[in-house]
Structures are given as C-alpha cells and as structure tokens.
Image (spheres, rainbow, N blue to C red):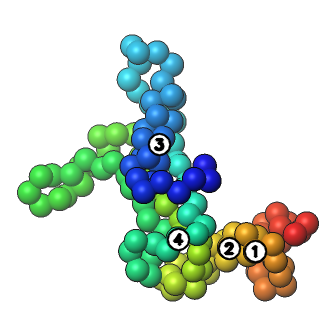
Amino acid sequence: QHVNYSQNFERFYYYHLAAIIETLKSYQDYCFPKTVYTLVFFTDRLSPVSGKNILVHDAEMKAFIDGEVANKLFPHKHRLFFIFTKAPEADTRLSEECQEWIQAIHETLKEEVYLHQFKTQEIKTLFFFF
C-alpha cells in the first residue's frame, strides 16, 4: 500500500488481524495453524519513537497488576513489525545485519545501491540488478 493515511498504524493492525483470522479453516476451528508476521515498511517518514527504526506489536497475555507475561497460553506469537527506512543510521542499537537491510531498502528507493558497502550476501544477490 503506497498511500499515506493519518491512521496508518491502526489500518495496518486491522490488516494484520485479518491475516491472522484468514488462517482459520472454519468457524468451528479456533486454533491458529501458523504464526503470522506482518512487515510494514515506512519509506518516507521517521519512526514516531526517536532512534528506533523497528517497532513491534504483539499480543502477549500479561498479568494486570505487574505486567508479568503468562507464557505458553498461546502457541503462536503473531507479530506486526513497523520498519522505518527513511533514516537508516538513526537506530544504532540494531544488529549490523538489520542496519544493512534497512540501508539497502533505503538506497533502492533512491535507485542507487552500492553493493560493495554491504557484507550480507543475500543483499548483494537480491539487489544485483540495481
């Protein structure tokens, strides 16, 4: 989706939930057969959390008072990732490989990918034709 709506986060959360529901075979089966990961790339805006280019939303069961996570209640941990590529250097806490991927995506949008600066072989293979 290449449209900039003001309600981006809720809109993509809705799409993520719809994708999870679509994994069910029938209304009688409420066990999700697989884990759903949704990746949303924001290429023209900065992260709403300064210095953090990857934000994750997941549904964990937690205790109300202390926030302690109740493990093993749900076999699948569905996750919605918001990835901001406009300022790849902004998040210095990411692994080098994550930073490289964000940098590569950022550069493809400028139609200039200098493969010699990347160490990750998958990036070199994927972006060979740029």
The tag earlier along the polypeptide, 2 or 4, is 4
Tell me residue 20's x, y (percent).
47, 35
Give the residue number, with chain letter if any, for mark 2.
Answer: 106
- Against 120, residue 93 (above or below) is below
Q: Residues within 10 Å of mark 2 (few under 14, many from 20)?
A: many
**Number of the label disc, if any, that sits on residue 45:** 4
Element assignment for label 1: loop
Real-space Cα separation, disc 2 to disc 1, in angstroms? 7 Å
Look at 52% across and 48% down and name the residue there.
Answer: 37
Look at 51% across and 36% down and name the residue there.
Answer: 19
Which three-letter amino acid code belongs to the residue tagged 2? Answer: His
Q: Quadrant of the C terminus?
A: bottom right
Real-space Cα separation, disc 3 to disc 1, in angstroms? 28 Å
Real-space Cα separation, disc 4 to disc 3, in angstroms? 21 Å
**Number of the label disc, if any, that sits on residue 110:** 1
Q: Is residue 116 left or right of residue 20?
A: right
Q: Is residue 61 left or right of residue 41?
A: left
The reply to whether the C-beta atoms of the residues labelled 2 and 1 are less than 8 Å apart is yes
Tell me residue 64's x, y (percent).
12, 52
The tag earlier along the polypeptide, 4 or 3, is 3
Can the viewer see residue 20 in this picture?
Answer: no
- Against 57, residue 13 (above or below) is above
Give the residue number, with chain letter if any, for mark 3.
Answer: 16
- Quarter where residue 102 is shown: bottom right
Q: Residue furthest right?
A: 129
The tag earlier along the polypeptide, 3 or 2, is 3
Q: Residues within 10 Å of mark 1 (few under 14, many from 20)?
A: few
Element assignment for label 2: helix
Q: Is residue 27 left or right of residue 3?
A: left
Which three-letter amino acid code belongs to the residue tagged 1? Answer: Lys
